[in-house]
Image: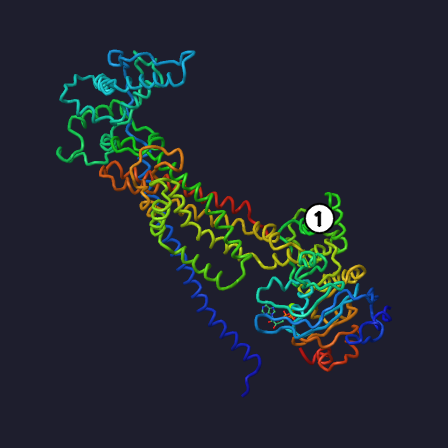
Amino acid sequence: MNTSAKTNMPSSMVSVGGGESRTSKATNNVKMRAKDVKVFYGDTQAINGIDIDIYENEVLAFIGPSGCGKSTFLRCLNRMNDTIDICRVEGEITLDQKDIYAPDRDVVLLRAQVGIVFQKPNPFPKSIYENIAYGPRLHGLAKRKAELDDIVESSLRRAGLWEEVKDRLDQPGTGLSGGQQQRLCIARTIAVSPDIILMDEPCSALDPIATGKVEQLIDELSESYTIVMVTHNMQQAARVADRTAFFHMGDLIEVDSTDTIFTNPQNQRTHDYITGRYG
Amino acid sequence: MSITIEQRRQHRLMTIEKSLSTRHRKERRFRRLGLAAVIVGMTLVATLFASILMRGLPAFWQATFYMELYFDPEVIQVEDKPQQASGESQAEFNQRFAAWQTQVGLVNWQSLIDAALQETLDEEIEPRQLRDLRALLSSNERFTLRNKFVEDPSLLGQTIEVKMLASANVDVWIKGNIDRDLADARQQLSAQTRAWADQLYDAGVIRNAFSTSLFLNTDSRSAPASAGLAGAFMGSLFMMVIVIALSVPLGVASAVYLEEFAPKNRLTDIIEININNLAAVPSIVFGLLGASIFIGYLGLPLSAPLVGGLVLTLMTLPTIIIATRASLRSIPPSIRQAALGIGASKVQTVFHHVLPIALPGILTGSILGVAQALGETAPLLLIGMNAFVANVPSTPFEQSAALPVQIYLWQGNELRNFFEARTSAAIIVLLALMLSLNALAIWLRKKFETRW
Ligand SMILES: Nc1ncnc2c1ncn2[C@@H]1O[C@H](COP(=O)(O)OP(=O)(O)OP(=O)(O)O)[C@@H](O)[C@H]1O
Ligand SMILES: [Mg+2]
């Protein structure tokens, strides 16, 4: 257990409950910090000023009713919101103490550091190999073909997909099943070795077995990555997350160790939501 | 008495069943209507094609003379063809050669043909019959003969079998494209010429041979039988190359910029609206614009494929931009997000992922746009491409005809009986060109199609 680490977290955000069900790899280094983040779509405000710290190697889950801004906030963390024309982000988000919205910040580099896996699997309509190799090649991570082959294999292995696809790497990634596609997308993300992986409901399109595999994968990945995931599945949050953040109508109501959130939430709305009385 | 659940279930099923039968009836009616629409459309297209083919195909074969011709040294009194002597400069030689050519040109080639015909008919021809005799052959064949001799002066004194085009009127007469019972006064040919034509046709001297002149010659007024499409074809080809070279890169680049990079603001809205408006502008207006800007202002040559190509480019651009944008827009945004999420830049995302997927759509749209431009006539009339041009352009700057304009010109030719079939033949050539372009579009589409 690493609860001692968590008690050292900034008190404004975290109060820590008892032992977790899984072995946490979280450290108490702040990897990312959001300060008073507000997001607007045109004139409507979707996020009303959120402060949160994300620790190195932790698994952080965002929960909350539909439309409360989980995806919106997640997309702020690697500036995917930039691609939405009407979206405007205010406040400050730092990665390793450096502002990611600073004018001189290169989003390409940022996204290589903060990877994202989307809710719907979206492999490129190219071969399985190309799907994985694209990122490393783009960033010049492999000098030779053999190196690239290595990256492809290890990424697929870590995503638990290697055994299933090793004989058909040249076939289109879009020909895989939904669960395989999602693991392919995860492999594609880890192929560029980001520090942080954002996942937006990565299991919402998957059956329980595939979900289990992805959850196991998340657990393994937390060894070397920081993972922020959005989920609608309470059990999933309970199973994989070190900490859980509850969002409601654009506000971050409460963030705490997963156990605390599920057993002893400080806020009434969190309590209502967890117990199914709301949302 | 209360209604049981079972009764309610029965009732619900019956209601659904009742509505089902009307629904099915409606569906059947709709399907029949659709089928009928397709059949009507197909019938119309089939009729169009059949009538064009029926009228045009015979024109690919043309009444042609096969007869012995004696290169009579009595008539052809010229010096030997000059050879470049050693030590002689090119200019000196050219001068000598030109002089020789003038000599050859002055030879009375027509009399050789007259003699050959006389021989073939095995008849003594009186001088007053010469007119009727010469009406048999296309009037430019004496030049063909001359060119043959210039090529090969050793023909002098020899008798060889030559192949010569019959005149347009003979072609019409042989093919029965004119009423044979018409009164003499209303026939194009004299009674004597008609009789000779029949006699020669029966003797196998006049045969229906594949008409190479249709493809190798340019338009001709003095000798309509030899009128061909070579000039118009080259003109259209030049224009096509110009249109492809200009409108595809310009159109695709603008579309990619507008769709993928341009900020969505008032200015881009206005641009978008105007592009759509441009696509709806009648083509003749582009012709007017071309005439005033390219010819009037920039001083480019009249009737040149260059100007035609520029005008058609203007016309095709909006089509290509719209097709490309539609193709780009149909690509799921998730692909862009996937690439951006890995850390590809916007440009990389577009070039690595978006464009390859959009390529088949872009190609199809572009080729269809170009094919449409190729068949356009109205704007070309306004930049003088309806002028009579009797040479094959070797550059896009020379005067030239164009296929659709050639069709228009032939359609209006007063030698109706002959040019009706010729017009349809030209239409067939144009359609063949378009169909091959469309086939190319389909092939490219299949080749580059992304399998999801
Ligand atoms: N591209 C967009 N343009 C305009 N409004 C948006 C856009 N994306 C999200 N919103 C709005 O922002 C608010 C938050 O949306 P968001 O997608 O972040 O919710 P969420 O918590 O992820 O919901 P869910 O659990 O259903 O995915 C919603 O009111 C939504 O309508
Ligand atoms: Mg969401």
**Quarter of the image holding residue B102?**
top left
**Quarter of the image holding residue A206?**
bottom right
Quarter of image, ligand 2: bottom right
- Residue B341 drawn above or below residue A167: below
- Residue B46 drawn above or below residue B258: above
**Quarter of the image holding residue B425?**
top left
Question: Which residue carries the number 1 mark?
Answer: A140
- Residue A35 drawn above or below residue B304: below
On the image, the x and y values in percent for residue A267 come to: 74, 81
Which residue extends farthest bottom?
B1
Q: How many marks?
A: 1
Residue closer to the observer: A5 or A117: A5
Give the quadrant of the N terminus of chain B: bottom right
Residue at x 44%, y 56% (from the top left corner):
B275
**Chain letter for the residue marked with disc 1 in the picture:** A
| Label 1 Cα neighbours within 10 Å, binned few <14 / some 14-19 / many ≥20 | few
Is residue B2 left or right of B367 when viewed as pictured? Answer: right
Residue type pointed to by label 1: Gly
On the image, the x and y values in percent for residue B237 come to: 41, 39
Is residue A118 left or right of A43 when viewed as pictured? Answer: right
Q: How is the protein colored in the picture?
A: rainbow
On the image, the x and y values in percent for residue A116 come to: 69, 60
Residue closer to the observer: B17 or A79: A79
On the image, the x and y values in percent for residue B216 come to: 36, 30
Is residue A147 left or right of B421 when viewed as pictured? Answer: right
